[in-house]
Amino acid sequence: MRKKILLMAMAALTAAGVLCCCGSPQRTGNGVEAHGRLRVQDARLTDEHGEPAVLRGMSSHGISWFPRYLNGGAMKTLREEGANLMRIAVYTEPPGAYIEDPQRSLDYLYMGIESALAEDMYVIVDWHILKDGDPNELADEAAAFFDGVSAHYGNCPGILYEICNEPNGDTQWEDIVRYARRVIPVIRANAPEAVILTGVPNYCTDFRGPLADPLPYENIMYTMHRYIDVAQKKPCDPGQLEALLDQGLPIFVTEWGVTLGDADPSAEEAEENGLRQTEIYVENALPFLELMADREVSWAAWALSGKDEIHSVLRADCGKLSGWTREDLTGFGELVFDHFQ
Ligand code: IDC
């Protein structure tokens, strides 16, 4: 009886728009409550009102190493800074990651998803292959993983699925198509309308495959990953992204970040010696950021962590788990936080 009254009360609140289907409170703004269910229409991410939806936020680092930043306070801080997206990277390897200890990764993943949804943010569930360059190597495990997650969140409009992080090595587009044909129907059986993202060959840089032979499903986007060299003052060239958008390819930049550039022989040494992050030319990334803003391309920046490396948005000496201010951010972190909105 009590359960029935509770269900009736929840139904009334949902009908009145006070609760969404995931149980989070109603918000205004640029999050899930405002945009609702996403679709890919005319190669663009579109919200349930038919308007363009632009998602911007952070990618986690590998959740097996940095689960600490998936907490509710961290998501609240990102949200207050203007982010409406959190990408959660479930590494398949090395030891300690999903394949060796799936339950641990799932615990962290679900904690992160719930923290982000509670802050009205969209979430990308990222099957983070890397050393395992061909996603077919772990297709059985990926199918079981996505079946479990999509069964939990089938009706929730806040979840996007990224079926493979960065195919690499000699993995061809045909291999990715074969894998996608295996995994996408598993997700769609539980979450028929979910937006699904897929990586492309050579670490998400080679788009010839999807241009010639796009995946035969609705609501698909292809992921671009872009790391901008900030070791020498040289603004980046965003031409590849522009050309792909002009050709009508639906692109989601699920990782962008900075690198010290492998062409520079001193870069590795500089990183090893802890090159002061204030000395890098983060403004080299501006042409890419500006193009993404102009063309309403959604993005996640790599990565939300304080690991002592060039990719971190938090300073290595920042012990805070949330509530970061400008002083806690690296130069790269400031650039990212300044562009969430
Ligand atoms: C990097 C992490 C680094 C870790 C390494 C290997 O920043 O701490 O040691 O992975 O696990 C990618 C990948 C992403 C990389 C990132 C930076 O998707 O996993 O993270 N990067 O190297 N593609 C291009 C760059």
Image: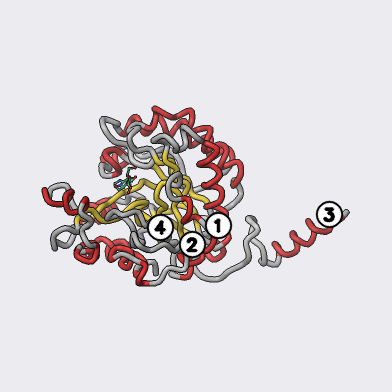
Tell me which residue sits at (53%, 39%) in the image: 187
| Mark identifier at residue 115 | 1
Measure the C-alpha gap from mark 3 to mark 1: 28 Å
Residue furthest to the left in view is 265
Q: Are marks 2 and 1 in contact (CB under 8 Å)?
A: yes
Q: Which residue is mark 4?
A: 58
Q: Which residue is mark 2?
A: 74
Tell me which amino acid carries mark 4. Met
Q: Secondary structure at mark 3?
A: helix
**What residue sits right under mark 3 in the picture?**
4
Pinpoint residue 92: horizontal percent, then vertical percent.
42, 36
Q: Give me the residue at 47% from left, 68% from top.
A: 323
Sequence-wise, the earlier of marks 2 and 3 is: 3
Q: Earlier in the sequence, mark 4 or mark 3?
A: 3
| Left or right for 241, reference 6 | left
Mark 2 or 1: in front is: 2
* Image quadrant in which you'd find residue 191: top right
**Which colour scheme appears in the figure?**
secondary structure
- Residue nearer the viewer, 58 or 193: 58
| Viewer-closest of 310 and 316 | 316
Secondary structure beneath label 1 = helix
Distance in Å between CA atoms under marks 4 and 3:
40 Å
The quadrant in which the C terminus is found is bottom left
Q: Which of pointers 3 and 1 lies earlier in the amino acid sequence?
A: 3
Q: Which quadrant would residue 198 be assigned to in this image?
A: top left
Residue placed at 23% from the left, 64% from the top?
Answer: 282
Point out the frontmost of discs 4 and 2.
2
> Label 3 neighbourhood size at 10 Å, few (<14), some (14-19), many (20+)?
few
Q: Mark 4–mark 2 contact, CB under 8 Å?
A: no
Closer mark to the observer between disc 4 and disc 3? 4
Identity of the residue drawn at 26% across and 44% down: 205
